[in-house]
Amino acid sequence: AQSVTQLGSHVSVSEGALVLLRCNYSSSVPPYLFWYVQYPNQGLQLLLKYTSAATLVKGINGFEAEFKKSETSFHLTKPSAHMSDAAEYFCAVSRGGNTGKLIFGQGTTLQVKP
Amino acid sequence: EPEVTQTPSHQVTQMGQEVILRCVPISNHLYFYWYRQILGQKVEFLVSFYNNEISEKSEIFDDQFSVERPDGSNFTLKIRSTKLEDSAMYFCAHRDRGPLNTGELFFGEGSRLTVL
């Protein structure tokens, strides 16, 4: 079975500060890992994905995440937060293949203070 | 970027009424999904659909729910007799590849269902 745990339901940072959103996964097979962002009253948009190539993955809007198998983690970072980054962030895991089902974490709300 | 159109964007209904949520994905995509998100909670898998049949469903997807793709384009989620706890945002998603799929799904903007 696969699962995802996001540590911290709310994270608050100042504009310009480092953003770190934590995600740990559990998977019995090599996982595919994703970060999705949800802006208020909008759908889910893919930020980045890990698909067993490079362990450091760069996504849109300056975000990146590093896959660490030894720590079963896939934390999302951004060096400098912008006000427009305020949103809900979801980490997700999939085993790929014919099922392709995504399993989501609980989500982390990022607040960016001026 | 692939687009998914969901209708209605918001529906208010009385408890016990039937609701149909619609999704129009890119026509050549073969794998379809419904997810829901109760306010303030995580996004939960409901059902996956391939080749005109359900390939997987969650415990949430009970006999009150059904899905179909009647005309080869629209993908619908029907709730036969809505309950208060069905109030949520419902997301349609799809992808276009089979065994080589890496799991990435493309989501619509959601249909908000409010059951009174």
Image (tube, coloured by chain):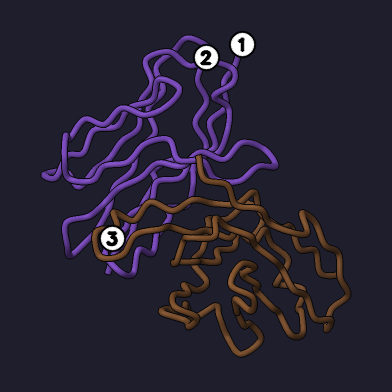
Is B52 located above or below residue B113 in the figure?
below
What residue is pinned by disc 1?
A114
Determine the residue positioned at 63% across, 82% down.
B65
Which mark sits nearer the N-terminus, 1 or 3? 3
Is B47 located above or below residue A108 in the figure?
below
Q: Please check whether the numbered discs 1 and 3 fall on a single chain.
A: yes
Q: Which mark is residue A96?
A: 3
Which mark sits nearer the N-terminus, 3 or 2? 2
- The one of A48 and A78 positioned closer to us in this rendering: A48
Which mark sits nearer the N-terminus, 2 or 1? 2
How far is mark 1 from mark 3, CA to CA?
40 Å
The amino acid type, in three-letter code, at marker 1 is Pro
How far is mark 3 from mark 2, CA to CA?
37 Å
Q: Which mark is residue A14?
A: 2
The amino acid type, in three-letter code, at marker 2 is Ser
Looking at the picture, how far across and down is residue B30, in whole percent?
44, 66
Looking at the picture, how far across and down is residue A19, in whole percent?
41, 23
Q: Which chain is brown?
A: B
Task: Write down the chain letter for disc 1.
Answer: A
Q: Are marks 2 and 1 in contact (CB under 8 Å)?
A: yes
Determine the residue positioned at 26% across, 42% down.
A50
